[in-house]
Amino acid sequence: MSKKNKIVLAYSGGLDTSIILKWLAKEYDAEIIAYVADLGQGEDLQEVYDKALKTGASKVYVEDLREEFVKDFVFPAVKSNAIYEGVYLLGTSLARPLIAKRHIEIAEEEGAFAVSHGATGKGNDQVRFELTFYALNPEIQIIAPWREWDFKSRNDLLKFAEENGIDTGITADKPYSCDRNLLHISYEGGILEDPWSEPPENMFEMTVSPEKAPDKPTYIEIEFSKGEPVAIDGKKMSPVEILSSLNTVAGENAVGRVDLVENRFVGMKSRGVYETPGGTVLHVAHRALESLTIDREVMHLKDSLVPKIAELIYYGLWYTPEMEMLMAAVEDSQKNVDGIARLKIYKGNTIVVGRKSDKSLYSEDLATFEEDDVYNQADATGFIKLNALRLKMRNILQK
């Protein structure tokens, strides 16, 4: 293979992708272009850039994808109320299709024959990346080193790193792996593999424990337009500013921790611990406003779609015809979701204490228990008898 051939590698600067960079250059005798996606992981990306060049990359892309991530991936998930298996707000899952989309764009710009990633053969990420690669460029070649090379253990990787002068940065401070972006942090592996073992308190980065949260509640108001958050406490903000601000206030009040054993797409169960402070608050606020503005049957139908939408996101099926259809339905359902949700945040709890909208379907005149001249209660008699007809027939048949 000629050295003119190029491979674009999704690079994080960690042990795996640093070794992969060097391994690809040797194994494929190719020019390796490193691609670093900035999704708000809070790392020194200049350091990652420098390390990629030092490890052998011919070129490094550092792409700021934060606004696109929040606006085009996080907010649609909020609008759809997507939660996987009842608790997981899909922080990692939502990031992967965006990372992979830009990965393909760079490969096409550079004329690369292949793309490569550091996902293992056991996890979900390999599926999420590669399904997106194939959806956007069916002709691209994909190199997944974890499914090709002969390394069997972490010690094998460390030995390769030492032989090739790669700085591993491995310490004993974090005996687990973590993935961070603006929406969340995920923790898995290592000491967390025992589902009976409580996560150590010093592990958490975005949230304090309920015990250390303030004894006084915090009140906030979140304004939505067509289901999308646009302001906090009356101040208009960009998508990144909104999520960052909510991460701060929710994290300070112990909101957003989740510990679950989830079903991976590849078939095994995995224990994951997550922090999603701002995302948790957004989901609660959004549902509160939907309750005021969406027709009953539309809401119930939309709710029935939530498990499927969450499953598609989790499995990496963002760029699919079924996802396009479902998200079109979600968007249509949000056309009247305008207004403000008022929340009380206190010691790990996000409590709805008010909601208002100019497009509210709620009528105080209809709902009141006091005297009214709008609703004739006698009308309910026929309504109940008609709905009871099939139950009466069933009873007659049984007798």
Image (tube, rainbow, N blue to C red):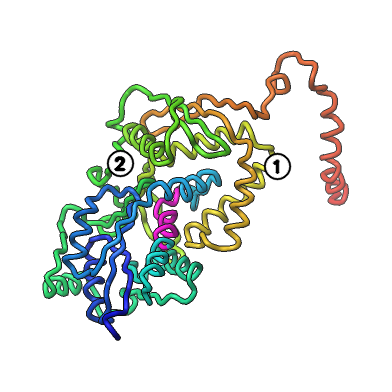
Q: Give the SS element for disc 1.
A: helix
80 relative to 244 in the view: left or right: right
Q: How many marks?
A: 2
Q: Position of residue 99 (x, y in %)?
A: 39, 59
Tag 1: amino acid: Glu
Tag 2: amino acid: Met
| Residue 129 part of the magenta-drawn span | no
Our reading of the magenta stretch's main secondary structure is helix
388 relative to 309 in the view: left or right: right
* Vertical position of residue 238 compared to residue 178: above or below: above
Tag 2 residue = 206
Q: Pick whichever, 178 or 74, lies toward us.
A: 74
- Residue range in magenta is 87-100
* Vertical position of residue 207 compared to residue 57: above or below: above
- Is residue 29 visible in the rendered image? The answer is yes
Query: What is the crowding at mark 1: few (fewer than 14 residues within 10 Å), some, or many (at least 20)?
Result: few
Q: Image quadrant for the N terminus?
A: bottom left
Could you say which quadrant of the image residue 128 lies in? bottom left
Query: What is the crowding at mark 2: few (fewer than 14 residues within 10 Å), some, or many (at least 20)?
Result: many
Residue 297 - label: 1
Q: Residue at x 46, y 47 (%)?
A: 74
Q: Give the SS element for disc 2.
A: loop
Q: Pick whichever, 309 or 107, lies toward us.
A: 107
Question: Cα distance, mark 1 to mark 2?
Answer: 38 Å
